[in-house]
Image (cartoon, rainbow, N blue to C red):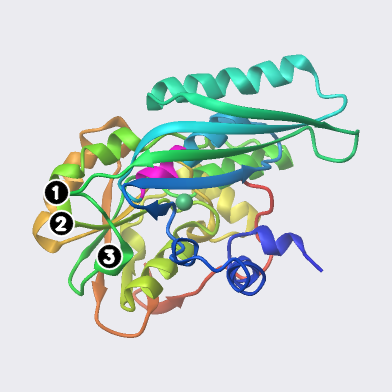
Amino acid sequence: MITLGHGAGGMLTRRLIETRFLSRLKSPALSSLLDSAVLGDLALTTDAYVVSPMIFPGGDLGRLALCGTVNDLAMVGATPVGIAAAFILEEGLSEETLDGVVQSMAEAAEEARVEVVAGDTKVVPRGACDGMFITTSGVGRLHESFSPRPSAITPGDAILVSGTIADHGMAVMSAREGLSISGAVMSDVAPLNHLVSRLRGFSSGIRALRDPTRGGLAATANELAEAAELTLVLQEPAIPVRPSTRTACELFGIDPLHVANEGKLVAVVSDEVKNDVIQTLRDHPLGRHAALIGEVAPGKPRVELDTALGTRRVVRLPQGEILPRIC
Ligand code: MG
């Protein structure tokens, strides 16, 4: 039986994908497990969004559905060409709620400078879905001189993050639980395509990009380590976390490394360009808290964390059901 844990982006999600899907839908592009499939000079991606509540501090389901797909295209270096959106609406949903979600999707599309060019609507009876679910797909155009892929990661490379982590997941959790924390916890949901286009000039100096969504930085770092077959060593004190978000994590007893982000990227870059890349990220509003958080070392494919206490521990894929319906 499927459990909520199968949707949490950790070990169970990984096993679900490998045993139920990859074994049957045999496609090299699918099995590459990149954020988007690479098909010649095009990139293609699709994502379903079921976040609860559908409106949360810093965004809503419409903005999330647009940005998530734009970001998956950006992580393989593609410029978005067009987005398709399918809406599943529950009987009884108010037109006002629907208008708000579609309006913020439109605003996010304008921010990303991409259009929603195809769509579908379905209505299901009361109780058959929770208000509204959206699936978005995106097509992007790849650039010949810029193709960040985890397989290009080399020992000695630097690991960067474009800003504070765990804001999205904690904003959704706080809204769901009715928690109010001073210095509000806000989702970071944003389109990253303009930020990534500024990195194009670094060409192969940008080894790999990944958006640490479900499963958070812990899942993303593990995926990169496995794809590169190398050890990623992270420095815990260097990883930026907003104080209000850290407070929320402590209240829920959740490691910020396991919490979803929707407007951040992890970049693995060559040692020679790392300082210039950090500066380039910081020059953009969406990257102003960019930081160097670790480096790639030879060794087994795994993630190690040098903690604030001066110890080193292994960071595994999140286990079980931590944060269901966060995106
Ligand atoms: Mg992604």
Mark number displayed over residue 294: 3
Q: Which quarter of the picture shows residue 209?
A: bottom left
Q: Residue at x 30, y 30 (%)?
A: 285
Query: How many dots with numbers?
Result: 3
- Which image quadrant for residue 279? top left
**Which amino acid, mark 1?**
Phe
- Graded by Cα atoms within 10 Å as few (under 14), some (14 to 19) or many (20 or more), the crowding at tag 2 reads many
Dominant SS in magenta: helix
Is there any visible trace of residue 102 in the rendered image?
A: yes
Is 133 in the magenta? Answer: no
Of residue 248 and residue 15, the one placed in the foreground of this image is: 15
x, y (%) of residue 252?
64, 54
**In what element is the residue under mark 1?**
helix
Tag 3 or tag 1, which sits nearer the N-term? 1
Mark 1 or 3, closer to the camera: 1
Where is 57 relative to 210, above or below? above
- In the rendered structure, the answer to whether residue 111 lies left or right of residue 48 reads left
Q: Residue furthest left?
A: 272
Q: Is residue 74 magenta?
A: yes
Image coordinates of residue 116 in percent, x first then y, are: 51, 25
Which of discs 3 and 2 lies nearer the camera? The answer is 2
Q: Nearer the viewer, residue 145 or 223?
A: 145
Residue 306 in view, yes or no: no
Where residue 204 appears, as percent x and y from the top left, is: 16, 56
Q: Which residue is the site of mark 1? A: 202
**Amino acid under disc 3:** Gly
58 left or right, relative to 161? right
- Asked if the residues shown at circle 2 and circle 1 are in contact, with their CB atoms under 8 angstroms apart, the answer is yes
Per the image, the residue denoted by label 2 is 205
- For the record, the magenta segment spans 70-75
Residue type, label 2: Gly
